[in-house]
Amino acid sequence: MPAIDKLFEVLVNEGASDLHIGEGQPPKMRKHGDIMAICEKPLRRDELVNMLREVCGPKGWTLFEEQGDFDFAYEMDEKSRFRCNFLKQTNGYGAVFRLIPTRIASLAELGIPAVVRQFGDLRGGLVLITGPTGSGKSTTLAALIDYINTNYARHIITIEEPIEFVHHNKRSIMTQREVPEHSSTFPAGLKAALREDCDIVLVGEMRDLETVSLALTAAETGLLVFGTLHTNNARKTIDRMIDVFPADKQPQARTMLANSLRGVLAQLLLKRADGTGRNAVNEILISSSAVSSIIREGATQKLQDVIVSGKGQGMQFMDDAIWTLLQQGIVSPHEAFMKAIDKNLFKKFLPAAEAGLANSAGSSPDDEQRPLGDFVKSRARKA
């Protein structure tokens, strides 16, 4: 048994999500969003090297030594799979491991609004799943792909770095490709997908101009494209998609995105007030003629009003979703304030000392405060 498996077992048994190890440091884990030490004994260089070499193999270790970074997946047993990143840093070697559940939870089990299933019913277009690192994007996207795999006969190609959730063929054919093991880059894998008789393609990360451009082209040609971005709401997502293009290409990009976008699902994870875990909250944008016009105009500041007024169609604004959790006592005022987009709406619920710090952190002294309940009621009347 590889020596690092003992640390992985602690991770699994504790219900933690990530393992951090580094030279001269004790191993640490992230549990419910917080990092804590597993033990007090720091790892020596020889211990760390042995741990890392055992799980990546000679070829992987050579690549890591040459590049200074190395991403791959490691399966400890049939119930425990890890996304691994090796790195070099000022104090020597280090690594971070993310636990990937081998069982794919359903959208309902994850608490994702039922309207999201309609993204899986589409036959073409672009759907963006967004959120900061560690917000559960991959888990939600895996649940959505599994919904399609269970209910439709499609050819689904995923391009990932590395492969995280492993999908087995159900009604659909699943083809999972890893960068750089099976395809040299995301753009290369996306180009190849256009020649592989696929219906759906999942792009693990849309982080450069070529990938974004190819994804838009694929969506316009009739494929259903799922992509991920590190943005935390719909407006920032659309701005990021356009901003990746040079200024002279942005009008054309807006037109392509307006024609192909079918929806945005933004996700954050909030710590539960009772300390038992974290809850997902989502902002949901469903494309419409109004959304397409806003994208073409470049007037993304208008999207919030469209989302709020589109509640009847299943749309949801992030701050409204956070407010619901706060109202139900599921999250604390501090957590709601920290994750909210418009923090002024949540500031009045903070204890006095925290509210004072929030004011000194840059809020305007003449900010108009009103009860969030009144704010939500006014939105409901608009809708």
Image (cartoon, rainbow, N blue to C red):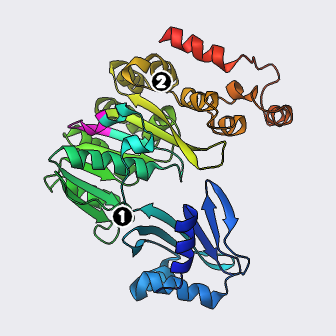
* Residue 380: image location, x then y, percent: 52, 13
Please name the residue shown 79% across and 25% down the image: 364
Give the mark toward the camera: 2 or 1: 1
Is label 2 in a helix, a strand or a loop? helix
Asked where in the image residue 271 lies, by quadrant, the reply is top right
Tell me which label, 2 or 1, sits earlier in the chain: 1
Label 2 with label 1: CB-CB less than 8 Å: no
Asked where in the image residue 82 lies, by quadrant, the reply is bottom left
Q: Is residue 324 left or right of residue 141?
A: right
Answer whether residue 245 is visible to the viewer in this image. Answer: no
Q: Is residue 115 left or right of residue 68?
A: left
Q: Please report the bounds of the magenta region as a residue range.
A: 118-126
**Which amino acid lies under the numbered mark 2 shown in the image of this protein?**
Leu
The magenta stretch spans residue 122:
yes
- Classify 54 as above or below 198: below
Which residue is more in the foreground, 367 or 325? 325
User: Residue 303, labelled with which disc?
Assistant: 2
* Residue 292: image location, x then y, percent: 35, 24
* Residue 148: image location, x then y, percent: 24, 45
Q: Which residue in the structure is indicated by mark 1?
A: 163
Give the alpha-carbon distance from disc 2 to disc 1, as whole Å: 33 Å
**Which amino acid lies under the numbered mark 1 shown in the image of this protein?**
Ile
Please name the residue shown 41% across and 53% down the image: 205
